[in-house]
Amino acid sequence: MPNNRVFLIIEYIKLNINRFFLLIVLLCIINHKELHAQNLNLIQDAEIELTIRKWVEPIFKVAGISSKAVNIYIVNDKSINAFVAGGQNIFINTGLILKAKKADALIGVLAHEIGHIAGGHLNRTINSMKDASNTVTIATLITAGLMVASKASGMRTPGIGKLITLGPTIAARNFYKNSRQNEKYADAAALKYMSAVNRSCLPLAILLKNLGKQELLHENRQDPYLRTHPISQDRISEIMEASKKIKIKYRDESKLDELRYKRMVAKIIAFTNNSGKTLLLYPKSNNDVDAKYARAIAYLRLPDLDKGIKEISELIINNKDDPFFPELLGQMLFENGKVYESISELQKSSDLLPNNPIILLALSRSQVESGEIKENNKAINNLKKLLQIKPENIAAWKLLSIAEARNNNISLAQLASAESYFLLGELDLAIQFAKKARIAFKKNSPSDIRALDIIFFSNERINKLRATQNITD
């Protein structure tokens, strides 16, 4: 009987540990898990991504982080949130961009997230989870031992059963303590970084203050940022006081930053709301650049191509060095069936901003869709250039497969398909297309070697998956 009791207690211990771990994991990385579970809607926009990159490059430098090692993703989500997950990946919700109100508020939040990366907080979180697990295990084992000893000796010791919950309670407190320490560290880092790059933290403090007002709301109504980044009045006061002490010199680019921010907001509003709402927010009486931009997008989505072209053409004429206005016009023309006309506008955009993967992909798409051999060949060159910059771009591999097939280069088309399937995790199809591609390749040629690599690495991943499945079973 005592052995059975010990067995039951150990099983109970396991159950407590699993429950506690589940709670911690959900609290720490729920946003990143949801990204995969719900296929979070990521936005790819050359202008927004480059603007944010331009703002944070100096902060990466101050933080001692290689900017090339950090990926920045824009999530189409109205809730206010930004978080670091899965290594050096920063995710920013469109809701945060819209509610920031000021460029420096958004940059301040990003400086905070960079502080988490610089502080190694992802690793610390994992260690905190391990420490929490150890606390649960030790406390529960002690309690289990007392219960068994008490029963074996025939003694009754009231309250021992309640000790079983002590481990998770202590562990939770320790974990949250570490989490609060991480937030304080990231705040201090943000203040340091923003001061070093001559930017004010007051807009960040105001944004946090407004978010902090949600603490009285039910958790379901709070923005995710508040749940993953606890905001206390003390924290806001510390940032506010520290911000007042930081002397910021006048910056020539301040007005330009606010214009860039307004353009980002206009773009997000126009693409994520119905056209009617956009036109109400940006009426014809408003002749600012961001207003014209928003209206052009709204007309595109109606669709009212004539009005859209009128709005965007004025912006192109008055801003000849801006690559994003011809990019939008090219998109408008393509989506309204004027494929060949879209090529010249997208080429202008690409000439103004060479080697941008998003613009190169849009240009290549128009070139392939035109159906002309000359344009198709240009598309192949552009896609190869793109894939040298972003070899993991699945859309580019798929488009390259189509372009090569149109030139009757079937083996190269099959190899491009193999690349895309490998990146998608469709490993059997990757192997199948790589094997087909090899038939026409000269042995040990670069294409043949690449096909062999795909076959080898696909098989390796399949074997690892099978081994993991066998362990689980």
Image (spheres, helix red, strand yellow):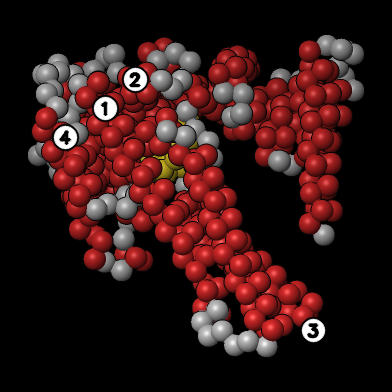
Q: Residue at x 42, y 30 (%)?
A: 118
User: Is 203 left, or right, of 397 in this rendering?
Assistant: left
Q: Residue at x 57, y 50 (%)?
A: 130
Rounded to the nearest angstrom, the CA distance separating label 1 from label 3 is 62 Å
Rounded to the nearest angstrom, the CA distance separating label 4 from label 1 is 10 Å
Percent x, y for residue 195? 22, 24
Mark 1 vs mark 3: give the one in front.
3
Query: Is residue 240 shown to the viewer in this render?
Result: yes
List the residue tagged with mark 1: 192
User: Is 208 left, or right, of 334 in this rendering?
Assistant: left
Query: Is residue 224 shown to the viewer in this render?
Result: no
Quarter holding residue 473: bottom right
Q: Amino acid at mark 2?
A: Val
Front one among 425 and 412: 425
Q: Judge the density around disc 2: few (<14), some (14-19), many (≥20) Cα neighbours within 10 Å.
A: some
Mark 3 vs mark 2: give the one in front.
3
List the residue tagged with mark 3: 1
Task: Give me the disc on residue 62.
Answer: 2
Rounded to the nearest angstrom, the CA distance separating label 2 from label 1 is 9 Å
Mark 2 vs mark 4: give the one in front.
4
List the residue tagged with mark 4: 242
Q: Are marks 4 and 3 in contact (CB under 8 Å)?
A: no
Q: Are marks 2 and 1 in contact (CB under 8 Å)?
A: yes
Q: Residue at x 78, y 13 (%)?
A: 446
Q: Judge the density around disc 3: few (<14), some (14-19), many (≥20) Cα neighbours within 10 Å.
A: few
User: Is 13 left, or right, of 118 in this rendering?
Assistant: right
Q: In terms of secondary structure, where does tag 4 sit?
A: helix
Q: Are marks 1 and 3 in contact (CB under 8 Å)?
A: no
Q: In terms of secondary structure, where does tag 1 sit?
A: helix
Q: Closer to the N terminus: mark 3 or mark 2? A: 3
